[in-house]
Amino acid sequence: MTRLLLLVMLLLAVGLVKLAEWNDQKVSFQLLPHKVLVLPQITLLVLAFAFGAGLVFMIHGLSDLASWVENLREGREEKRSEKAMALWKRAWTEINRSHLPQAISILERLVTLFPDHKEALLLYGDLKRSSGDYVGAIRIHRRARVFDEEDVRLVLALANDYEGAGRVEDSMALLREYFKKEGRNREVLEFFRRLLVKNDRWEEALSVQTVLARSFEKGERRDREVSVLVGIRFEVGSLLHHQGQTEGARRAFRGALKIDPSFTPARIGLAEAQIVEGREKEGIENLWEGWERTGQTLHLVRLEEFYLEKGNPDAVLSLYEKALGKKSGSPGLRFHQARIQNLLGMEEEALSLLEAMEGDASWGGEFYRLAGEIYERRRQIEAAIDSYKRILTLDPSSDQPYVCKSCRTFYPGWSGRCPACHQWNTVIRTDGLLFSEAASQDAGPPLHSSAPAFRTAYQEYFSGPTPT
């Protein structure tokens, strides 16, 4: 190879000498006013070739240098990635072994070496929160959000951090910002909804729940979310009613009933708003319609209270007589009739009715207490003692007039949402019965079914009327 190159160079040298002999012309270049440079033509030719060759070598040299630098950088990055992956695997190994302090230590080293490792920052913050270090978790997750503000995992993680640290307003502000930016992640919306409901922010919760419910296709999950939507609408109505905004309250209650006509809390709330506004006839008709649709005596008890407040006991007696005319076999209605008779001083009639129906159902403490009080006033002491003894055989925790049919928690008064399990439309009147009997009475068919089915109702609410 060397001999060949020497031969080529020798031949080129001979060629240049011959070219110089054959081309002895010269070219003059005036470089300065009094300076002229004279060069042979062959010299110009050689210089031109040399300049071109040098330019080619320079371009290729720079390209090779750039390739070398890029390979060096890629090599270093590959080593960094391998190191990061090794630390990441070690951290998860410690987590799987339940060695959280060791995992936190490894992740701390990882994010120190690689400050932009978002996954490591997310996990590191989560472990900090799980260890009770909410301040540290907030700092780390906020640092991670610098690299990606839209990552919903980081939004949820930071919201959890704020809530754990007792900074609920900061948590809601973060979620509110996400929601305003057209955020539609269901998990984030569910978290935001829960936080709003927990803190009684009902109007804002309604906006969030509407979006969440509409995000699901028709089916069981959407049914559950729409049920929550109905409950939140009821709470908005209750809030407005307590603030004296009865018109807004009526709209909220009607909105809930439009989706679910059998939602008793909204029915009662609407009737109360109408009565407050002086539209007593509408309120009375509304409560009666509610009882006909659902069979729940809550509506009748509210009517009873209204008539007694108005000083119209005859209307109360007529109320239960009218109801028994439609459901003559209802032991709960007959109990309420006896209770009202006793309240109005008709002890003999009440006692006679109670004695007649004692064996017709499984009665609870309210029934036997009423009978015992009447016996005691009539000085029938043995009968009174016998009634009170019957109460002692029952579960003391169940001796209340209202019960949640979902979690079986008993209450002395009614509420639209169970304070124990936080479900809406589950607290019913026991009507003097044991829970199992009261629940079966509540589950009975309505007197008429002119209202559309719940599924049809919410389909119309979200999508317009169903084509026929």
Image: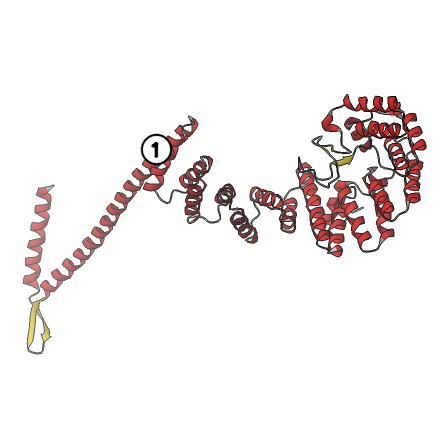
What is the residue that sits farthest to the front in this orientation? 379
Q: Residues within 10 Å of mark 1 (few under 14, many from 20)?
A: few
Q: Residue furthest bottom?
A: 33
Give the residue number, with chain letter if any, for mark 1.
86
Q: Quadrant of residue 442?
A: top right
Judging depth in this view, the residue of 3 and 226 nearest the camera is 226
Q: Is residue 106 above or below residue 239?
A: above
Q: Amino acid at mark 1?
A: Ala
Vertical placement of residue 85 versus 116, above or below:
above
Secondary structure state at the residue bearing disc 1: helix
Q: Position of residue 83 (x, y in %)?
A: 32, 36
Nearest the viewer among 274 and 337 is 337
Name the one closer to the observer, 67 or 157.
Answer: 157
Q: Is residue 246 visible?
A: yes
Residues 241 and 232: in front is: 241
Q: Position of residue 131 (x, y in %)?
A: 44, 35
